[in-house]
Image (cartoon, helix red, strand yellow):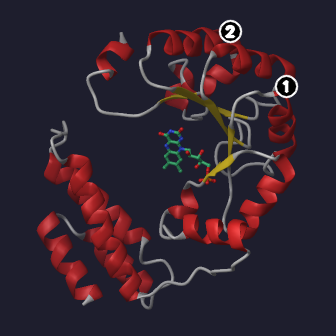
Amino acid sequence: KSLDYLESYNFDVIDINAGCPSRRAIKAKEGGYLMKNLEQMKILIENAVKYSSKPVSLKIRTGFEKPLNIEEMANIINNSGIDFLTIHARTVKSKFYGDAIDLETVKLLKEKCLIPIVGNGDIKDYLGAKHFIDYTNVDALMIGRESMGNPEIFNQIHEYLKHGKEIPFKNDVDKMKNFIQLYEECIDEYLTGFSHPQGNKEIEFIELKRNAIWLTKNIENSTTIRRSLSKVKNLKLLKSMLKEITG
Ligand SMILES: Cc1cc2nc3c(=O)[nH]c(=O)nc-3n(C[C@H](O)[C@H](O)[C@H](O)COP(=O)(O)O)c2cc1C
């Protein structure tokens, strides 16, 4: 039923989330809960593959509370028909900060899986990215939090891995201005032809505000600027404040 509903939207891949550690998700037997009920996960992904017209991927953790059973997980993945797997290298129980990242489980699973694997978790710069790939041999990387405020991280990693070029993180008001422009375009593209239940203007405001706050990372007077931005109540005021900040 969910797939029938989704098919009317314009998207490229269905990603099944088996990693979300929120209490709500675990209680509803979704997200990270699936890591402790692999039979349910297996049925879910096999059905998604069977009924979806688009590629299906799965996002997992390295286990629920302790490292997963590599053979069992690899078996499910290899026989499911999914197109690729993303693995966040920590358990559901350790949420986003707890415990050291578990690259060993990622490496062992990568050895057994027949589909491309995307590695994820705590990659903060190009050196971290290189270490992740060298250790686990994954096919690709996913970067989450570190890209918030440093959208250039993807290029920094690419340049280092492909050409050995080191581009350290640097930020200033001009960069912030360029990225805000880019985000405005992205948000506009995302909302074009779409009627968001919260209202498109509200979504534009929320998205632009939070990205602008992240983009103040390391610029002069960033604490004061962040404080002012977080108090802004509507899109018009936000845009005029951003103009004032970036010139
Ligand atoms: C605020 C926030 C929201 C997230 N939402 C999702 C989500 O909707 N689906 C998903 O698969 N992962 C989600 N994640 C997890 C990230 O995709 C990623 O696995 C996690 O942040 C670890 O990567 P990182 O250390 O590079 O941030 C979210 C993470 C954060 C911090």
Which of the two discs, 1 and 2, labels the residue nearer the N terminus? 2
Which secondary structure, mark 2? helix
Check disc 2 and give the amino acid type.
Answer: Glu
Mark 2 — residue?
Answer: 39
21 sits left or right of 73 in the view: left
CA distance separating discs 1 and 2: 15 Å
Which secondary structure, mark 1? helix
Against 120, is 6 above or below? above
52 sits left or right of 93 in the view: left
Residue sitting farthest toward the left: 236
Residue occupying the point 61% across, 71% down: 156
In this view, the residue in front, 183 or 19, is 183
51 sits left or right of 37 in the view: left
- Say if disc 1 is inside 8 Å of ligand 1: no
Q: Position of residue 230 (x, y in %)?
A: 32, 69
Check disc 1 and give the amino acid type.
Answer: Ile
Against 142, is 69 above or below? above
Using the rendered view, name the quadrant where residue 214 is placed. bottom left
Mark 1 — residue?
Answer: 70
In this view, the residue in front, 52 or 246, is 52
